[in-house]
Amino acid sequence: MTSRPVAITGMGCICAAGNNLDDSMASMFRGTRDPAPPLNFFSNHPIRYPVFEARDFVEPPDLLRTSALGLHAAKEALADAGLDQDFLNTLRVGVCVGTTVGCAISNETFCREYRSLSAPGMAPLERILRSNPAAVIAREFGFSGPCQTIVNACSSGTDAVGLAASWIRTGACDIALAGGADELGRITYIGFIALLIADESHCKPFDANRKGLNLGEAGAMLVLESEQVRKLRKKKARSFVLGYGSACDAYHLTAPRPDGAGLKSAIAEALACNNTDPASIAFVNAHGTGTPENDRVETRVLAEVLPGVPFLSTKGYTGHTLGAAGAIEAVFTVACLERGAIPANIGFATPDPELGGTPVTENTSFRGTVALSESLAFGGNNSVLIFGTAGGE
Amino acid sequence: MKIAIQGIGVVGGFGTGVADMRQALLSGVSNRSSVHLSNCGEPLDLSALRAETSRLNDFVPIKAQRRIDNFSKLGLLGAYLALEDAGVLAEGPQERLGVVIASGYGATGITYAFLDSFINDGDICASPTYFANSVHNSAAAYISIMLGATGPSSTVSQFHLSVPSALQTAWLWLAEGRVDRVLFGAVDELSELIGYAWYRQRGRADHSDMIPLVTGRESAIPGEGAAFLLLSRQEEVQGGYCLIDHVTTGRFLKPGFLRTPDELLILGADGRRDMGANYAALTEKSNIACFTPLYGSMPAGPAFDLAVASLMLKEGKTFASPGGSECDFPAQVVPGGSSLEGSRVSSLTLSDDDGYGLVNLTQL
């Protein structure tokens, strides 16, 4: 079944690479990154693993940092789309946000106090309960459309954009804010170290000497808009969601399926949505975590399904931002399509003969109007988005 | 498009499976249990409606369950029961099966076990197994792995609106032809710290039984469990329970969302004092029923309401609302045994931030 392209009319993001989309893009094309041991929390682990913190960002005391990051990106995206509150009040607006930390009912201080028999107060949990990322954004702007927080681990952001595109197509809402948000914290930091998939040095996606990921934090949002509203306000689209696909490996809780069958299915579904010719894909913004398994499976699938298509991972600039990753990579993919260039895959130096290919090693211009962004996740989720700058005009 | 409910899998305070739920609906009684709280100033046992997962042994070898936490076991059991109820359990790998899970709180027991692992012994001793199981989509992952379900999988967490929100996703997947079936389920577990949080927020109930149709009283009893529905496009199946006509969500402060006051409304009212008045105000002159006393108060509750509605529509008659005869809502409580021929049943859920979810169901 083919599906109509859905217009993207605004974008916003915040991450370690920058407090907004323009700054983040400029930083990546300059080839700069600055991961360092965490400043916002302490760990007594003997190794100080580098992370990518959004250092200048301070969340308000009544909100989870995750939700505040999402709200920050949402405000930039709405401003970029030229949508003001008075006009939004006349529309049915949906919010779809992917996250991991933003819905976790876990607080270390609370847990420590409970275990130490001191009957903790409820303030930490009440803060979590009023910080559901999608609900926070809907509440802030008074939106009354569908509101959903997706918790599909590291594919959450990709899935949120894909679902929101369906909302627009089916008329569930006139406009959808879709994206992802996740904060850095001790619990995920310690968890990924325990899983032995964190790199003690700067992450090196697709490199022969890669040892794992560096965690990051981010918020990224896209404004998806119905053709009816876009015509009404004569708004040019920045790009279009041409396709979305997702499939489950049904293989392992944390490891990708070695034959990449789930990822292949997701790519095939995304291509079929709008009959996208694989040869038209100008580049792939890969998941590229820098873990041995992910990068092996992913490159082998790309070599088989999209041979010769340039690819990169932007996680070398942002860290792995978990539930926000798919969203911020979607935003970067669209911005790169507009620019006609992709940044170098930072951290890559030595080709790995076991991989299906090597990423771009310098800022690279391309011709073409279509690009693909993909996410792989705990739970075996594989999710793919295809964007095109000319798909729906 | 309409969606057919082909099978139901439920586990909760009333027991395990449709037969146990039906028996509880007829008797109006569930098995009261408790959650032990070791630190509330002094230890206490908080009254609760707990679920137990021993029947999972019928479907999954015990050895294969050894690393699966309680949250995912609840989900797995609900999923298997729904497939068994639909008569499709023996079909093998499900390539065109989507999995959609709703959970308000996620895997809180294993999450706090993970925290314990490094609080007790230092960050270097954190348990990778506990961390891997603590992600919200762990139940969906185990279900996909065990069933060989390679279609799309998604988990939704929207607190008390998790169920209607996730059901919208299941609906879309079927409408778009992405899948042939969706295993839709809601799961919530009552871990000790969720129990503690409940106690701190709500205290002990001021009534021994849940009386959700009485405003101004705190009678909520926390529950846990899983409720699963196997969903298909109407035109592709025969039999089953009923049809889902519409799923809508929004804000109830915007007027006019309840346009069908004549149909039977199953309310998600669950004895929380702060929510009762909203339900009462919105359902004036409606025909209502409420079954939360059978499974307790939890974000997954509306999925149990859908299971009850399905059973009523299949049998063509109502069940009596448990919780005694007490009601001060300006509405008509429908008695048990009333005919439902040609009628619609809707499930209404309200959140504490003025959101609502409304699911309209009809007979096959």
Image (cartoon, rainbow, N blue to C red):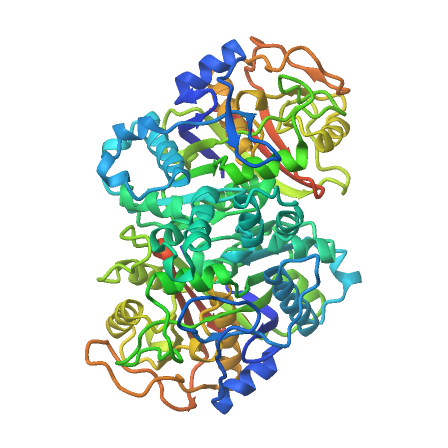
Work out whether residue B234 can be spotted.
yes
Residue ranking furthest to the left: A353
Q: Residue at x 30, y 72 (%)?
A: A295
Q: A69 or A85: nearer the eye?
A: A69
Work out whether residue B176 can be spotted.
no
Residue B114, image x and y in percent? 42, 51
Specify the quadrant of the image occupied by residue A40.
bottom right
Residue B149, image x and y in percent? 30, 46
**Position of residue B232 in the picture relative to residue B316 (left or right):** left
Residue B35, image x and y in percent? 51, 29
Say if B180 sits above or below B81 in the image.
below
**Position of residue A72 in the picture relative to residue B172 (left or right):** right
Query: Which quadrant is the N terminus of chain A positioned in?
Result: bottom left
Q: B160 or B32: nearer the eye?
A: B32
Residue A79, image x and y in percent? 70, 72
**Position of residue A132 in the picture relative to residue B191 (left or right):** right
Q: B334 or A114: nearer the eye?
A: A114
Query: Which quadrant is the C terminus of chain A positioned in?
Result: bottom right
Say if A167 sits above or below B167 in the image.
below
